[in-house]
Amino acid sequence: MFHFCIMRAGAKNFAETRISAPPEGRMTTKTDTLTPQQAAAADLLAFGATVTDAAETVKVSRQTVSEWLHHNAAFQAALHARQRELWQGNAERLRSLVPKALDTLERWLASHNGLTAAVHVLKAAGLYGLPAPDGSIDAAEIETEREIAASDLSVKRLDSWG
């Protein structure tokens, strides 16, 4: 079972986080290869926790979480999936606010010289140019990309010797 973490309302840090079952309709990934600690750490990192905070919360060493983050394709895929899920959820939430924001802005612009506000709205429509998370959510694909990168590095080394 894939678990995820929610920071408790009023919590001051991720140590006050609880682990629970995923909500209905949650995107699922190939997480059967992750331990509950890995799944929880992936969620914490996706929510913005540091490696140190995630490690303390799931009761493993910082080095262990760092190794998962940099060398475990299944962990990376789960983290990417969770980041993508959070990004999409926040984008949907932001889009749901657009009608109210436009009504408010329209009223304000009608009564003020709103050039600055209008420029901000135009910039915000592109989400300030921030790209959505695009890391692979497929562990096999991550492994393949890693192997290709290692192979490319080997070829470059051979070329530099020749």
Image (cartoon, grey):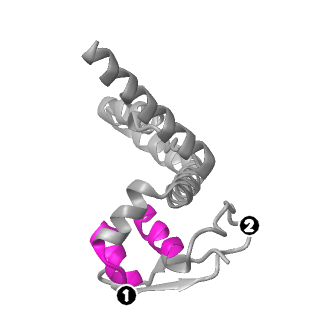
Can you give x and y, in whole percent of width and height, for residue 13 in the image? Answer: 31, 80
Q: Residues within 10 Å of mark 2 (few under 14, many from 20)?
A: few
Please give the name of the residue rendered at 45% of the width and 30% of the height, measured from the top-left corner.
151
Furthest toward the top, the residue is: 162
Residue bearing the label numbered 2: 25
Please give the name of the residue rendered at 62% of the width and 68% of the height, measured from the top-left corner.
33
Look at label 1 and name its amino acid: Glu
Q: Is residue 133 visible?
A: yes
Q: How many marks?
A: 2
Furthest toward the front, the residue is: 162
Q: Main secondary structure of the magenta part?
A: helix
Q: Which residues are magenta?
A: 38-62
Choose between 94 and 144: the one closer to the eye.
144
On screen, residue 44 versus residue 61, left or right, reads right
Disc 1 element: helix
Q: Is 53 contained in the magenta span?
A: yes
Look at label 2 and name its amino acid: Gly
Choose between 139 and 54: the one closer to the eye.
139
